[in-house]
């Protein structure tokens, strides 16, 4: 599903984002990526969604070489990748339904299909009854579930969750993690980027630990011990 071969990314001449990264994530895996600030996690996410390009090496997702992907093809790539960030990035003037629908509208989906797919996405995150509410009327956990629903609108094969529980309390954190596990059970590959030691250790899934732009540990059922 995700393959990086000898990937290096530098900022200027002396700041290393990633250095000689080799990584293979199989379809349907659930992988946590951990490490302290500046370890290279954010750079890795930016390369996977083609927000940035590597200086060296090759990146492929689902067999598609995106190393030198043209700008015109980036929207096509991002329909195959769901992305969830810590800051919700919801449109405050739009309802829950409209926020999720917006992701389909910008890709030119028909109104008929949108009316079918949005309720399905909201059903997965248990928010069908909140479709007409606005973000300000939701709790933090509910807002993050709207973001997840939006990320699922194109039924992506890969979901990248970058610090999805960073702004949530322990109860909402657990609900979001359980939701990500359920999405993984559907067959979606999940990459979870997090600082939350307790979350990682409770998952008992594969853990990649990064430090100074390198992968320093890769454990099948690892723990976050830094």
Image (cartoon, rainbow, N blue to C red):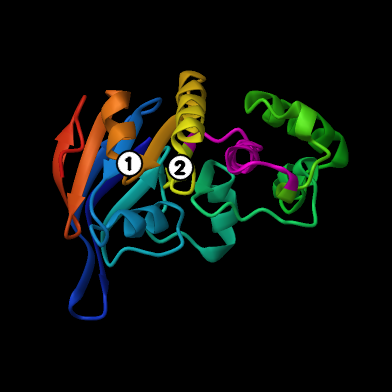
Residue 149, given in percent of the width and then of the height, sits at 64, 36
Task: State the quadrant of the N terminus.
Answer: top left
Q: Specify the farthest residue to the top.
A: 185
Quarter of image, res 145: top right
Q: Which label number is shown at residue 154?
A: none
Residue 111, given in percent of the width and then of the height, sits at 86, 41
Quarter of image, res 214: bottom left
Quarter of image, res 124: top right
Q: Look at the image and give the residue range highlighted in magenta.
A: 137-158
Q: Helix, strand, or loop for circle 2?
A: loop
Of 156 and 100, which appears nearest the observer? 100
Task: Say which residue appears at 80% left-offset and 57% top-offset.
Answer: 93
In whole angstroms, how far apart are the C-alphas of marks 1 and 2?
8 Å
Task: State the quadrant of the C terminus.
Answer: top left
Relative placement, left or right, of 164 versus 27 is right
Of 20 and 191, which appears nearest the observer? 191
Tag 2 residue? 165
Q: Is residue 176 above or below residue 42?
A: above
Task: Say which residue appears at 63% left-offset and 28% top-offset.
Answer: 125
Residue 117, given in percent of the width and then of the height, sits at 75, 31
Q: Specify the farthest residue to the right.
A: 112
Task: Say which residue appears at 81% left-offset and 34% top-offset.
Answer: 113
Relative placement, left or right, of 41 versus 136 is left
Q: Specify the farthest residue to the bottom.
A: 13
Q: Which label number is shown at residue 196?
A: 1
Residue 219, given in percent of the width and then of the height, sits at 17, 31
> How would you rate the neighbour count of disc 2 (Cα within 10 Å): few for under 14, some for 14-19, many for 20 or more?
many
Q: Is residue 210 above or below residue 180?
A: below
> How would you rate the neighbour count of disc 1 (Cα within 10 Å): few for under 14, some for 14-19, many for 20 or more?
some
Q: Is residue 151 covered in magenta?
A: yes
């Amino acid at each position: 599903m995700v393959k990086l071969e000898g990937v290096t990314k530098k900022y200027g001449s002396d700041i290393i984002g990633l250095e000689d990264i080799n990584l293979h994530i199989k379809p349907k895996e659930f992988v946590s990526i951990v490490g302290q600030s500046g370890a290279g996690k954010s750079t890795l996410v930016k390369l996977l969604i083609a927000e940035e390009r590597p200086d060296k090496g090759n990146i492929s997702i689902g067999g598609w070489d995106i190393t030198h992907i043209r700008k015109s093809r980036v929207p096509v790539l991002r329909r195959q990748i769901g992305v969830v960030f810590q800051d919700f990035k919801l449109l405050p003037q739009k309802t829950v339904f409209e926020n999720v629908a917006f992701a389909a509208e910008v890709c030119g989906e028909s109104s008929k299909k949108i009316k079918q797919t949005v309720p399905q996405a909201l059903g997965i995150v248990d928010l069908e009854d909140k479709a007409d509410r606005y973000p300000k009327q939701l709790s933090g956990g509910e807002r993050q579930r709207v973001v997840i629903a939006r990320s699922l609108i194109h039924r992506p094969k890969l979901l990248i969750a970058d610090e999805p529980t960073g702004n949530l309390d322990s109860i909402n954190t657990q609900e979001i993690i359980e939701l990500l596990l359920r999405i993984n059970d559907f067959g979606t590959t999940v990459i979870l980027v997090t600082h939350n030691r307790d979350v990682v250790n409770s998952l008992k899934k594969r853990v990649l630990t990064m430090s100074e732009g390198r992968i320093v540990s890769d454990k099948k059922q690892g723990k976050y011990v830094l």
